[in-house]
Image: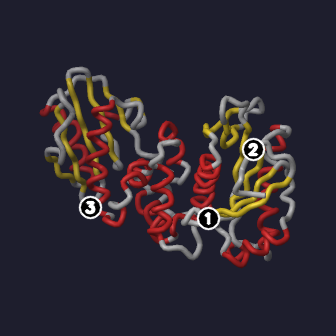
Amino acid sequence: MAKPLRFRRSTETWSADRVDALLYRDLDENLGAESSPPWFRPPPGYDARRFDMDNGDTALFAWDDDGAWWLGNTETPEALWRTDKQSFAEAPFEVSRWAQRELLAELHDEAPWLEDYPYVSWFFLPVFCSKDGRETTQAFFREHAAGFPDADFRDALDFYESFLETGVLDDYRHVMAGKLGTSEFLDVARANGAMGEFNAAWLLDEAGYDVTPEIEVTTGHSLDYRADRDGEHGALVEVTRPVPTNDRAANTPIQALKETAATKTSGQLEAHGGGAVLFVDASSFPDDEWHRVRGERPEVGHRPAVVFRVRPDGAVDGYAKGGVPLDLPQVD
């Protein structure tokens, strides 16, 4: 499975003739390619080319006296095989901004329904334009309403646009966007699980907490978040998201809830030895399944725990088990 889109950094000396000889010729012979000026003006001091392949792939190349930067969702030419990879945030700001303008324009040309959601488009650009995941990740947001059952995809996108534009996850964009996956085959359960982490971050942010993802603990595991507020010692949070009953072998929503939670309690949380809060995001459950869970308030095999469900309009309902060291007015 390919990774989220990243730059390749070359420290060699480049010229227009060398770009044609080592990059364009390689791409054209292997895939069929067109070489053209970029759609947007290159960064100051750089020359740049755009490559559009016959199969729909795209690549960008910018170079100056100190080297070059390649970004593409296609085969990498042999001349760049041994180059280092860097995320959008690690590349020079001007180069990264230019390349993302090129890709966002192409994304909105191919998927105009995303144009009304500039922050969602930008945040998930590393997967929306990835080699293997561009079709599946876009389909998840449009055809599966980003994991919200019985919802219009526009409402789901409005929800995530409003949350992401706060910037609370900007510093962790590459790792968080990458959680959505870049497979050419859409795994809805996996994608739902990834959005469960965004829902948990939203819930914590709404309650006034700062969230830091991917917290390494002494067991060698990483827990999903640390939540801090007002300089207080942060609480560690691990997130899981059960699949609705109609999509799994479990024949009741409560069994589905417990089975999914058990994968965490017998894994990271057991190894961690306690202290972390388990967040169980039941946002994939339709109304009838959630009402049964809410009515019975079942245990999930771990304390402290928070079981919650978010809807695209920002409505949230949930309950807590054990002494949750977080002030969450949305749950009781």
Looking at the rendered structure, which numbered label has been put on residue 297?
Answer: none
Which residue sits at x=39%, y=54%?
Answer: 121
Which residue sits at x=74%, y=57%?
Answer: 331
* Image quarter of residue 256: bottom right
Which residue sits at x=36%, y=31%?
Answer: 91
Which element is circle 2 on? Answer: loop
* Image quarter of residue 85: top left
Mark toward the start of the polypeptide (2 vs 3):
3
Residue 80 vs 139, above or below: the answer is above
Report x, y in % for residue 75. Answer: 34, 47
Q: What residue would you read off at disc 1?
A: 315
Q: Locate the C terminus by quadrant.
A: bottom right
Q: What residue would you read off at disc 2?
A: 326
Mark toward the start of the polypeptide (2 vs 1):
1
Residue 213 in view: no
* Image position of 224 (left or right of 147): right
